[in-house]
Image (cartoon, rainbow, N blue to C red):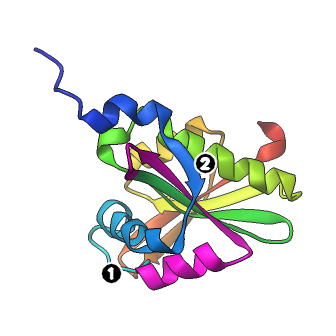
Amino acid sequence: MAAPPQSEHAEHAEHAELKLARLSDAYRIARMSRDLVEHGLPWSWPARRVAIHIRGGESNVLTAWVKGRLVGFAIMQFYDERAHLNLLAVDPTARRFGVGRRLVKWQEEVALSGGMHIVNLEVRANNAGARAFYRMLGYRESKRIPDYYSGREAAIRMTHDLRRG
């Protein structure tokens, strides 16, 4: 059986350009969040909320672009001693080319440079693929949180101690 054809964007995804989001990116990021992360849940990351993080001094909104098309983003919030990965999404056509890994690693480097060694995140408990992805990056499952997502779905909190690689 022949492999399915890759999209033009997939062919170039491993060379995606990473850059900080602009306010004009907020709506596209919000739509990606709604479609790829929040599917089946009430939309909690509309453009207004994304824009707050783009403007905010304690957050980074990093984007990945291929040929002028947004293919991924990561929103990380920074606190005094830790950081929290709020959202990560990669377009399905750009997955498995290192885009998600590069987005997370870039955000982790920012956390480290600010003296933060612990990064937390939550992921849907039933999202085995995402949980495996984060484990591959060094995250460990630390807690199950019932009804975390709009009172409908459980989350798994995952933690990465950046001092351990």
Residue 131 versus residue 119 in the image, above or below = above
Q: Residue at x 38, y 62 (%)?
A: 37
Rendering coords of residue 81 (x, y %): 85, 66
- Quadrant holding the C terminus: top right
Cα–Cα gap, marks 1 and 2: 25 Å
At label 1, counting other C-alpha atoms closer than 10 Å, the crowd grade (few under 14, some 14-19, many 20 or more) is few
Residue 22 versus residue 44 in the image, above or below = above
Left or right of residue 118, residue 103 in this image = left
Residue pointed to by mark 2: 104
Between 80 and 107, the one lying in front of the other is 107
Q: Residue at x 42, y 66 (%)?
A: 29
Residue placed furthest toward the front: 68
Left or right of residue 91, residue 122 in this image = right
* Number of the front mark, 1 or 2: 2
Q: Secondary structure at mark 2?
A: helix
Rendering coords of residue 74 (x, y %): 54, 58
Residue 33 got which mark?
Answer: none
What's under tag 1, amino acid-wise? Pro
What range is drawn magenta here?
46-70
Q: Is residue 160 visible?
A: no
Q: Is residue 51 magenta?
A: yes
Rendering coords of residue 108 (x, y %): 71, 50
What's under tag 2, amino acid-wise? Val
Between 14 and 66, the one lying in front of the other is 66
Upstream in the sequence, badge 1 or badge 2?
1
Residue pointed to by mark 1: 42
